[in-house]
Image (cartoon, helix red, strand yellow):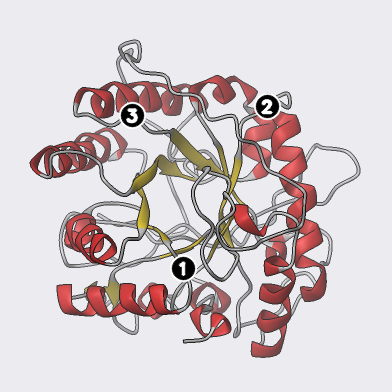
Amino acid sequence: MRVDVDCSTVITEPAPSTTSVSTTSTPVLSSSTSISTPSTSVPSPSTSISAAPSPSVSPQIHVGVTNSGSNASGQANALNKAVSSNGAMGMTYSPYTGTSSSDSSCKSTDQINSDIQAIHAAGFNLVRIYATDCNQLEAVHQATQSLSMSMIIGVFFNSAGSAQSDFVDQMGSITSYFESQGGYSGIDLVIIGNECISSGICSAGQLSSFLAQARSSLAGSGYQGPVSTSLILKDWLDNPSLCPDVDVLASNIHPFFSDNTVSPNGSGDYVDSQIQLVQKACGNDGKAVVVTESGWPTQGPANNGMTPSESNQQAAIGSLRASNNAKAIMFFANDNDLWKAGPAVKEYELYFGCLGQFGQ
């Protein structure tokens, strides 16, 4: 059962001399083609998770985030891979269609192929997906491989009550598929959970256990790359115990959801400052920061003095692309998410689609 979380609520940060970060509601997944009505109320974690085995492989990525301000193609991004030709790190992708949560469904393989080709044509070499439903793992992997692109893949927890089964089912899909492929070709990062602490789906302890279990399962199936979880800044600040559990520091950073008003033209500077706080939360341990979502909506009500519009999105995307850390940013998202529409979902959450800002 898919549960969409309204993340537009502003979260106050304890860190000094900075503004806070809250994020957009992100794609949410189910094991079927029917997508349930979004809900903004997520129960507290209730799933009992047994102690995870010690990881058999613990790769550490210490490339860090540079501040050179140079985004030329051919340089390394935050995962030490080639930068996309447009200077960014990559683009997020969800394989759903429909005009509301009541009529949402999965895109066909042909539609997914067309979407990935459009993302590639816009200059991106890296795509992030959130889970494994709708045949997205297989379809997106085949599409990206045909274009010599890479992927960030993930496990998504739909609710506190389903977290354990979500983990087992999706990890099983990941390991079995890539074993059938003879390895994890084109996979740059595996993300376990997307904002699962701030959404009330899991505790830091549960997430730590999931990360350890994932690392062990992935290593057993031949994956030797980095593993992480995507959190908002507040959750990194509040839970530094998670820092040793990840190989890169993944964080969704949206200027539009700052506690303090950020101008679209100031989006790049805002993300740069938040990256420094993520690094500080983990003791400046040298791990790379990956901004797993950032963008600006084009429609909907204003949020804390910040207005969605085409022109503001253009300015924000331009600022992010010109920022010192453009090579660390995954832009959110390739298309508008009209399939999220429902009574509890704010309009701007549907309109972060920004691929057109990169040209075709």
Q: x, y (%) of residue 231?
A: 56, 42
Q: CA distance from mark 1 to mark 3?
A: 24 Å
Residue 212 figure quarter:
top left
> Does residue 360 appear to the left or right of 136 in the view shown?
right
Most distant residue in the front direction: 74
Give the quarter of the figure containing the N terminus.
bottom left
| Residue at which label 1 appears | 124
Q: Nearer the viewer, mark 1 or mark 2?
A: 1
Locate residue 220: give its quadrant.
Answer: top left
Farthest residue toward the right?
17
Residue 145 picture location, percent across and down: 25, 59
Q: Residue at x 29, y 82 (%)?
A: 98
- Residue 101 at least partly seen: no
Numbered mark located on residue 282 in the image: 2
At mark 2, the secondary structure is loop
Q: Which residue is mark 3?
A: 224
Along the line of sight, the residue nearer the viewer: 308 or 276: 276
Label number found at residue 174: none
**Of the image marks 1 and 3, the number of the one nearer the N terminus:** 1
- The residue closer to the viewer here, 160 or 220, is 220
**First reached walking from the N terminus: tag 1 or tag 2:** 1
> Left or right of 80: which side holds 343?
left
Please tell me how crowded label 1 is: few (under 14), some (14-19), or many (20+) other residues with Cα within 10 Å. Answer: many
Residue 68: where, in percent of width, then height?
77, 51
| Secondary structure under the numbered disc 1 in the rendered image | loop
The amino acid type, in three-letter code, at marker 1 is: Phe
